[in-house]
Structure formats: C-alpha cells, structure tokens
Image: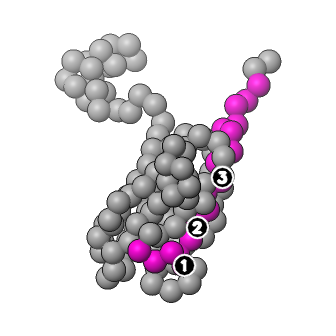
Amino acid sequence: MTPRLLIALLLTVGLLSAWPTAATPPYTAITIESAAPYFVPKSVTISTGSPIKWENPTGSEHTVTHAGCLEDGEHCAFDSGLMLPSGTFAIPELAPGRYPYLCLIHPIMRGVITVTDAFTPSHL
C-alpha cells in the first residue's frame, strides 16, 4: 500500500481527523500555597503565546488579580474572581510586558509574570 493510499484510507476512516493541526504550548503552572512565597513560583518569565494556569490546592478562597485592575481598570489584564479551594484559573496568553498580581483577599500574596516577545527564527 502506498503512503498516499494509506493516508486517504485513514482520513476516510476518520483516524487522522483527531490529530492536532498546530502545536499548543504547554502552560506555565503556578500553585497557590498557604505560606510564603504563596504563589509558586513567585516570579515567572514566559514568551508570548504561552498559557498560564493557577491552581488552588489550599482550603481557602483566593483571587489572582493583575495590579492594573486596581490602578485604573483600563489596563486590567486578568482577574480570576473568587477562586474556590481546589479551583483553577487559566489565561491563554498575555502581551509582552510585566504583570504584577496579587490576591485581593490576602494582599500579602503577590507574584509577577514577565512576558517576552516570542522567539522568531530568521529566514535565510
């Protein structure tokens, strides 16, 4: 059987339709903890297009709120709202920049995300 015929057969049967068409970058995981530094890791640097996910395994409610939401509201990049115990909050991506954030319920809990331009290889 030729490779072309095999691909046609697999498409007809539907086996190739579930294959992803584009690579999805793995998310950066940030865990909320009940003791310092509270957000682990406290500071992360990621490239544009990288998703981020916070996990709350604690027994308390928390928020993940960008400091821009408190300053003027116009530059609010993300706000989880109330995150229940065992809850998660994710964002697909952020524009390049520095994003300090905190828990509104426990303002001592603070973290920073730095987003850099994604590496784009030059074409020869």
Image marks 2 and 3: residues in contact by CB distance under 8 Å: no
Q: Quadrant of residue 118?
A: top right
Q: In which quarter of the image is the N terminus?
A: top left
**84 is higher (above) or lower (below) than 23:** below
Q: Residue at x 80, y 18 (%)?
A: 124
Secondary structure, mark 1, is: loop
- Range of residues picked out in magenta: 105-122
Q: Mark 3 points at which residue?
A: 98
View extreme (right): residue: 124
| Residue 111 tag number | 2
| Disc 3 from disc 1: Cα separation | 19 Å
Give the class, few, some or many, for how many residues have Cα within 10 Å of label 3's Cα (few <14, many ≥20).
Answer: few
Give the class, few, some or many, for how many residues have Cα within 10 Å of label 2's Cα (few <14, many ≥20).
Answer: many
View extreme (bottom): residue: 35
Q: In this view, does 124 lie to the left or right of 51?
A: right
Image marks 3 and 1: residues in contact by CB distance under 8 Å: no
| Residue 108 tag number | 1
Q: Which residue is drawn at 56% across and 84% down?
A: 36
| Disc 2 from disc 3: Cα separation | 11 Å
Residue in front for this viewpoint, 9 or 11: 11
